[in-house]
Image (cartoon, coloured by chain):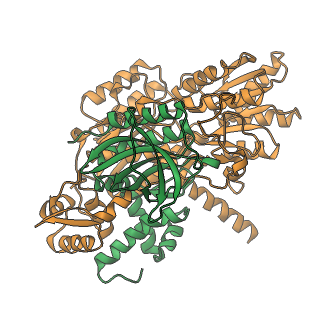
Chain colours: A orange, B green
Amino acid sequence: MPTGETPRSNLIRIARILGCFDHRNSPRPTHEILSEVGMGRSTGFGLLRALTLRGWLEKVDHGLLRLGPRAGGLAFVPLEAVDTTRPGSTAALPLDRSSADPHHAITEWDARLFETVSTDAYKRPAPFRIGFANASLSNEWRRAMFESMRYAERLHADRIDAFLVREAADDAGTQVNQIDELVKSGIDLLLVSTTNAHSPHLDRKLKEVADAGLPVVAVDRRPRDPSSLVSFVTASDRRIGRISALWLAERLKGVGRIWMLSGLEGASPAMRRQSAAFSGFSEFPGIQIEAVTYTDWTEEGGRKAIQRLFDQGGDAPDGIWCDSGLQGVGSLKFFVENELAVPAHTGGDLNQMYKLALYHKVPFVALDYPAAMGARVVEVALDILSGKSVPRRVEVPVPIVLPRGMETASVRADTWAERHVGWDLPGSAILSQGPSLRGLRSDSENKQGSRHG
Amino acid sequence: MDKADTPYDKAIDIFEGLVEKPLRKTVSGPLPLARAVGLATTSGYRAVAIAESEGLLSRSTGGAYLRGPATLAAGLSALGFGEFALVAEPVLIQLRQSTRLTAFLGVLSDGACIIGPFSSGRGITFVSPQRHCSLLTPPSFDPDRLAEVSLAHQFEAVAAQRAVISSISESENRLCIVGVLLPGTREGTGNELRSELARAADLLCSHAEKPA
């Protein structure tokens, strides 16, 4: 059977029976199915018979079964949850539009997303030992991603024997030592979110681990040399950088002065977002980039960057491009606290960013870098250790979030900021955290309950 | 959950409830889903967790339940095109993003179109496709492997939706297609749309999983 363990419930058995047929639905002998799924004959035949009677399986010949007519209906799968409350009047224009439409391409096909990797060589019986070499827990987003991982770990507890974590405080040397520790502790797979994309030492270490036969999967931040990775779970930083820049330029009608506040210098997402934003701004000759600075993806970093730029004698810009709300909050607060008119901003992620921008009616676009990639990377790790093919690169979708009335010719909302914001959640909440956000919501409700009680 | 005669039937009822309910209703959180399926709290919570863990369900970043990757893989395998299960999601999402239209994978067989995975357009181009449609006329593919077709609701002979499709694979008198649903019933498609669809078809063909 795929994972080595004996399924404990009929629901698990059903899932595994339906998953044991090949791409062409070739018929299989019943004894082979029972053996692969790890079922005894008595239970197994009973369940196969019931599934056949209900049309999920069908008999092809004596003792041969394949997926039945009802199973074809399982292919009907919506790939994304869609906010259907958007009014049609301001909705996205289809591509088939008139040539007079002043539209800029917001999507570039990325061929890297379609490559798949066979993982037969890494297949082993569950439960697994997984190690995670984490760059740091230095900001809310990183803590949210880690919570998302923990959620997946709990969900798959019966297949995970140990989930060992080391946190390197953004120091590449520390991370190299921690990877050694994790490998020595006998892990089956290494997850890594690298401290710095420019560390050749880290590149060499990961290559050494991969060459020794241990699968390595990166999440969020990858090493400069990706050859050591089986897979990389991320989101499109280029999409975040490009769309936020296009929106800001179009919002300013193609003319204005911009300050750019990037995240952590040397971190791969910050570099890719900044590069994509430069490319977006370059399509507008009237846009002038006056300053580019780094903020370490912190509120304090954002605030200090704006203070410094004012201290250097600059007038308030027309727009502030932030690659995340983590520093965007610091920038917004600076303007609000100094009673200055707040220029248009970009940057999502942090609930506080949405609360502040909506409350002060600041024009802004947000593309949340999904912290839910933490759960996704655990699923990819389990697939690899179960011998299932996985994509070489997994991109968790990044929806465009805009306040009502803030759409531009090219940039249309996937969801409205007014619906996306969590008014009942703390400002530090990361809204793209996925199901693990539920815990925060419960905590928040409990606090309110005890306050009222 | 009252038609179960045996433990097997009961388990199949739960399975059917869990994979069907998210198609009909937006549900966030295991308990609301368990309740929507008619399960008791404790056993329901456990069943939802198992379904998510086995890939029958997944969750959007907003927390809403969707059918999961194992459901998609089994469904496409049942239709004879399981090789597209892994690559369907990134291709269809990019096709939707680049065309801003609902992008889908489907299987044509005997004048019917079974809709597979899809990524819905936004705003005025939002369409929630019908699971089973019929083709009003057989598709006539041009040299670029593209065809414009009219889809009708199953058992109806009135065009409900126009689509432009491209064939990507054939197996046992079935044709696997990738397509986009056009807004309204207007005929004709622009070159840009055709080229995006052709690109998606090429990517699906070249990156489909090879047999083991």
Q: Among all residues in the image, which is located at the extreme right?
A: A339
| A343 sits left or right of A94 in the view | right
x, y (%) of residue A115?
Answer: 35, 33
The quadrant in which the C terminus of chain A is found is: bottom right
x, y (%) of residue B146?
Answer: 42, 38
Above or below A237: residue A26: below
The quadrant in which the N terminus of chain A is found is: bottom left
Above or below A449: residue A106: above
Q: Residue at x 63, y 35 (%)?
A: A97
x, y (%) of residue A147?
Answer: 51, 49
Q: Residue at x 83, y 24 (%)?
A: A316
Above or below A280: residue A377: below
User: Between residues B133 and B78, which one lies in front from this camera angle?
Assistant: B133
x, y (%) of residue A405?
Answer: 77, 43
> For residue A448, which quarter of the picture?
bottom right
Q: Residue at x 39, y 52 (%)?
A: B69
Q: Among all residues in the image, which is located at the extreme left?
A: A62
